[in-house]
Amino acid sequence: MSTSSAVDEREEGLKFQPRFDAAGLVTCVATDATSGAVLMVAHMNEEALRKTIASGEAWYFSRSRQSLWRKGETSGHVQRVVEIRTDCDQDAIWIRVEQTGAACHTGRRSCFYRKLESGDGGARLSFVDAD
Amino acid sequence: MSTSSAVDEREEGLKFQPRFDAAGLVTCVATDATSGAVLMVAHMNEEALRKTIASGEAWYFSRSRQSLWRKGETSGHVQRVVEIRTDCDQDAIWIRVEQTGAACHTGRRSCFYRKLESGDGGARLSFVDAD
């Protein structure tokens, strides 16, 4: 697995061979296909990835609940997948999605609704998105 | 830590309290501040995050080498940080950066240079970026 030819194949080849970590997961970043904004960062196991590819809608694996979930299953806030990319060493996935409603469970469009502001007393957060 | 008031504070508060995993890491997504493209997904430990905030340049923690690294330290391909965001539960970081040269160690602008194409024999990859 760590030979240079295996690395070359993984980095330069056309075979999709996602590299799951010790917990069986890859990191997945979902961005808004229109605005480009990062909506959320979550994880996929092999089954979630397979279902995402097959259905064209995002499925994830919840580490806290240790279970598979279809995004929007209860909320209706589904993600239609426009494109799936993988990175050089194939341990991360980037999906560009059409997001129905809110990606975040707090009801906000994106989970990344706060930014750091540096100040005298160290870094503090401030809200960035009106939605 | 898991009481509802602690969750509220983490999700709705203005205190920056990154939630490092068992290995002491948070996931970090770096996007191009101009194009919005996802450049890379990597990890930061507490020190990498602190140095990123203090210096305005991206620092990461390499899981394979188990060491801190300043992005571009040897290649010159530094990332100047324009904005730092955190997500709802503060276990992921999104940095918008001005990327000098290539984010990827393969010499490509982004690590996400291949996309999935579905075909008869299952998913295959194809190259997406000319650079």
Image: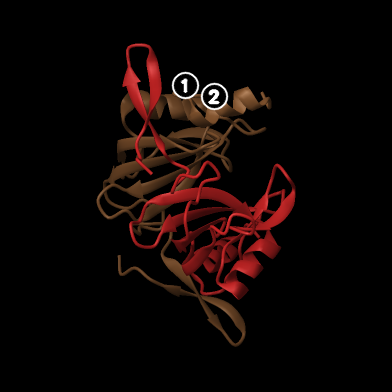
Chain colours: A red, B brown
Please tell me in which quadrant of the rendered image residue B89 appears: top right
For the C terminus of chain A, which image quadrant? Answer: top left
Q: Does any portion of residue A67 appear in the rendered image?
A: yes
The structure residue drawn at horizontal position 66% and vertical position 23%, both measured from the top left corner, is B1
The residue carrying pointer 2 sits among few (fewer than 14), some (14 to 19) or many (20 or more) residues within 10 Å by Cα, namely some
Can you identify the residue that label 1 sits on?
Answer: B15
Image vertical order of residue A114 relative to residue B106, above or below? above
- Mark 1 vs mark 2: in front: 2
The structure residue drawn at horizontal position 51% and vertical position 26%, both measured from the top left corner, is B46
Determine which of the numbered discs, if any, sits on residue A34 in the image: none
Q: Measured from the top left, where is residue B98 in percent x and y?
A: 27, 44
SS type, badge 2: helix
Dot placed on the residue nearer the N-terminal end, 1 or 2: 2
Image vertical order of residue B122 relative to residue B127, above or below? below
Which chain letter goes with mark 1? B
Q: Does any portion of residue B58 appear in the rendered image?
A: no
Name which residue type carries label 1. Lys
SS type, badge 1: loop
Q: Farthest residue in the top direction?
A: A121
Can you identify the residue that label 2 sits on?
Answer: B9
The residue carrying pointer 1 sits among few (fewer than 14), some (14 to 19) or many (20 or more) residues within 10 Å by Cα, namely some
Name which residue type carries label 2. Glu
Q: Measured from the top left, where is residue B93 in percent x and y?
A: 46, 38
Asked if the residue under mark 2 is in contact with the one under mark 1, i.e. CB atoms within 8 Å, the reply is yes
